Image (cartoon, grey):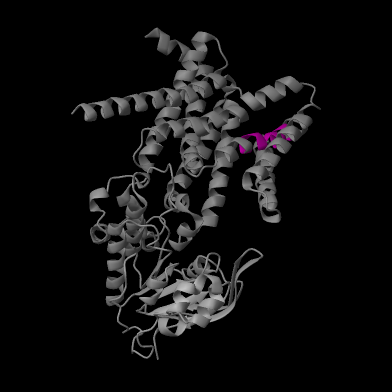
Amino acid sequence: MDWWIEPFLLGFQQRALIGGLVAAVMCAVVGVWLVLRGMSFFGDAFVHGVLPGIAAAVIFGFNPYLGAAVAALFMVGGIELIHRQTALKEDTAIGLLFVGMMALGVTIISRSNAYTGSLTSILFGDIFGVTDELITTMVVMGAVVIAAAVVLFRPLLALSFSATKAQSLGMRPRFAHAALLVLIATAVIASFQAVGTLLVFGLLVGPPAAASLLSRTVPRMFVWSVALGALSVWLGLTLSYHLQTAGAATIALVAVALFFALLALTRGVSAVRRRRVVAA
Amino acid sequence: MTELLAEAVDLRLGYGNQVAVAASRFTIPHRAVTAIIGPNGSGKSTVLNAVGGVLEPLAGRLTVLGGSPRVRPPKVSYVMQSLAFPAGTPITVREAVGMGLYPKLGWFGRPSADDRARVERAMERLGVTDLADRHLDELSGGQRQRVYVAQGMTQDHEALLLDEPLTGLDITSARVIDQIIHTERERGHAVVLTTHDLDEARAADWVVLMAGRCVAAGPPAEVLTREHLADAYGLGSLHAHAAEPEVLDDPHKPGVPGHDHSRHQHPH
């Protein structure tokens, strides 16, 4: 029993758990729509795209949330510009902004005296450095994200068919899409200090993808996604304590490993059922 | 004067800078079956999108049921093609059909018992009740098309728009949907469908012939003539029909909407 409790005895460990859980819930909810709408590449690019804003905030000493928000706006605007002005497909636009923003972020940080430390902290987070103030901010942003995800359920479900269908049902697809981008940005910005911009993507995609293997409806996918996200954080922190590995990276690793474990499990169960049907 | 579902005056349609339908003038009668026909890329679906209120005209005027098609709540139910479905989204047939209630319920409204009964009735009419708990991606194209029509029927509507509803369907699904088209008309609703099939167009009350613009609109006998078809399709594709333009029982039959609709055939 001690093996499970010991990793969370100290205050900073408990704050890491709470911060991680809040990030997991936020990302699990937003990530469901990211996965269902086939926007995983956009999500990946997005979490890297906020890097220059955060880097500038670190170097010039302003609020990193503001920096991340400005970078997110710039990124979405850039993708939209390329999409409208050229015949290139959206993934090319995303790729251009992805690498451009990432490179800009690293370039900005390279002017810092503590180059390696700053970069590592932004990319991989500092889950054991989570403060009470950060938890409060994360909880507020998390509440907004979850409320918005509930409000947007019908428009986003209709949008998963097509923008035309959503429009014909009066679900305002453009607004819903823009709102989803804001939700993704909010989840990333709220979570990056705890789990880092790179590894937040593990929580955005891992639990929802694993949840899709277990769910017959979208509401159930939300429930599974949140449960698997929370499990990833708790198990990740526990393993990181005992194996002496990096906290956020272990969480992301567990999230992805859970997907493959569930894939093997569900496929195995299906194969057994098929065999029973054939035998009967 | 015939009651109109839609009236287009100098209507231009397109996507971005791309014009799909050059300035066109046509009407679509209410309480009748209208077929929009034309070759690939002729603007059939574009016209349907505009009438359905999902595409804003580039220029000109389009009125639907006396107002702008973009004004909500829509009394026009738009049924998309079965090919379009959200692969990977865990959504059951019952949920998909229930989406037809969204225009009424908006983002937050809760469905009443009547609303739920409406969903069940639509599923029964389209013969998909047995599939209610199946996923959309577990269905055949024909079954999915029936689900989409059931979704359209669930929506409170006066007009049903169907984008190539019978293309590539199994016989059972095609029969069920064809029956729905008849019933809708009998109920005094308008049905507008796009098709590639001249026989389907001949069986309609009204035809809009497209070729990047509206070539002609009117009763089948007046629209599906050799001259118009040559204009829309080019001569090469017309040999079979040009040799025997079997259009045309009686162009002056008092038929819109009273035209004999019994010839509406199922696809082959």
What residue do we see at 38% from left, 42% from top?
A: B90
Q: Is residue A265 left or right of residue A66?
A: left
Picture quadrant where residue A71 is located: top right
Q: Quadrant of the C terminus of chain B?
A: bottom left
What residue do we see at 35% from left, 70% from top?
A: B157
Residue A77 % position (x, y)? 68, 49
Residue B13 % position (x, y)? 58, 71
Residue A139 % position (x, y)? 50, 35
In this rendering, does residue A16 appear at all?
no
Q: Is residue B96 left or right of residue B127?
A: right
Q: Residue B4: say if magenta.
A: no
Q: Is residue A121 above or below residue B210?
A: above
Q: Residue A49: say if magenta.
A: yes
Range of the magenta residues?
Answer: A46-56
Q: Is residue A269 above or below residue A160?
A: above
Q: Quadrant of the N terminus of chain B?
A: bottom left
Q: Tell which of B97 and A78 is nearer to you.
A: B97
Q: Tell which of A135 and B134 is nearer to you.
A: B134
Q: Tell which of B50 and B117 is nearer to you.
A: B50
What residue do we see at 66% from left, 27% from top?
A: A122
Residue A260 % position (x, y)? 44, 24
What residue do we see at 47% from left, 13% from top?
A: A7
Picture quadrant where residue A64 is located: top right
In this rendering, does residue A240 appear at all?
yes
Q: Tell which of B253 and A95 is nearer to you.
A: B253
Dominant secondary structure, magenta: helix
